[in-house]
Image (cartoon, helix red, strand yellow):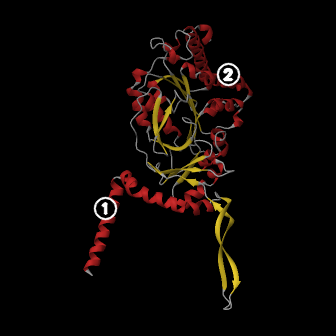
Amino acid sequence: MSDALIVLAALAAIAAGLQAWRHLHYPSFWLAIGFPLTAASVRASWRRVALGCNLTKKRQRWWFTTVPGAIASTGLVKVRRRFQRVAVDTKPFMWLPLPTRHGWRVTLHTLEGQTPGDYADAAERLAHSWGVHVVRVSSPRPGRVVLMATMRDPLVKVNELPPSPDLLKVTVGRLETGQPWTIDFRTVPHWLNAGATQSGKSNLANALIVGLAPQPVALVGFDLKGGVEFTPYAPRLSALATSRIESVSLLADLVALMIDRMGLCRQASARNIWQLPPALRPVPVVVLVDELAELYLMADKSEKDEIAKTSTALLRVAQLGRAFGIYLFCCGQRIGSDLGPGVTALRAQCSGRICHRVNDPETATMTLGDLDPAALASARAIAAETPGVAIVAGQDGQWYRARSFYVSEQTAEQAAAAHAHLAPSWDEITAHLPESITA
């Protein structure tokens, strides 16, 4: 009896030690214990899982089969084995799974007639079969499919990461892969950020302001809520428009600034401002637009010309601004095609897309619908109790679930005030523009 108690005590001590190891340093526990067991289970269950998810194909194979023979005098049926061709369910070939930070990934060889879409359609069934949080599907080359499994949701708690030291690059959160979520205006110049109230849209703008405030860039704001969103950050803003009339004037300045920089690049035989010598290179301008729909809404026909000017100028900045150091970050609760063709044209120029939880399917479709139907479905599944979670598309052409760090308004205000001396005056930026252009 004492020996049994000793064995039980030893097993309890081992279990407690493993649990403590898992709690104190999960990455090493996952690589040493969790992943080998998971990999063996995945490989052992792949035939059953593939068959249950309709990922197998019938193929003719030579196989030993059991066929009935003669009936013996005892009444028993004699059977014999026969080597013949039969139809066999063949599973896709699976390489060895490889560990990732939050799960594992494995490469498959597709069978004849299969496409990556077949595996994407079965992704939810695969996740339930293996008991993981989610399975993402990608295809690095024809005939190969990579399944990326995430064991647990890495976006439940997002800890702030160190800021990026690169110009016009801001770390705003974390991707579902565990990698930093960065907004790099040099790589993706224009962004569209949609989200309902309390979805995390404004928090993302706060994180962007905190990241850009210490950088040598000019920040320009369009806040048609009467300035209640961006006015607290005015010390770091070079210009701020709080009405449509002010927006028309400020957009005219941006277009004039863009034309002036065109001439500067042409004289220096440069394709963009980054090919200019540092002494001649103008300051980059990041344009922050809050409540984009307010620029397009029309109460009566008297506003038609004003909206047309606004729409045309904003579209020109989106089409030509990248080469001349003018970048857009447009936010809105409601972004739909019913706002007019100007919004649709602007959407086409914004290759960076961020969709938080939205109240209507049209906004999600407008933001992500032309990229990937699976991204659209994931955006509609964002829960209200997970503010800051969004579907992001941009940097590498793929889409990801992501979550931004929590940045309070007080933190953003403090960053704006602390770096107010870095804000170039808008009068200084536009002082050398010809009057005929700014008129």
**Residue 64 location, quadrant:** bottom right
Residue positioned most to the left: 2
Q: Can you say whether 226 is above or below 316 in the image?
A: below
Q: Is residue 390 visible?
A: no
Q: Which residue is mark 2?
A: 309
Residues 437 and 55: in front is 55
Badge 2: residue crowd in 10 Å (few <14, some 14–19, many ≥20): some
Residues 170 and 66: in front is 66
Residue 262 point in image, percent of width and height: 59, 13
| Number of numbered callouts drawn | 2
Where's the N terminus, which quadrant? bottom left
Residue positioned most to the right: 301
Residue 84 point in image, percent of width and height: 68, 67
Q: Is residue 8 left or right of residue 414?
A: left
The three-letter code of the residue at mark 2 reads: Lys
Residues 151 and 424: in front is 151
The three-letter code of the residue at mark 1 reads: Gly
Identify the residue shown where x is 72% and y is 31%: 341
Q: Which residue is mark 1?
A: 17
Where's the C terminus, which quadrant? top right
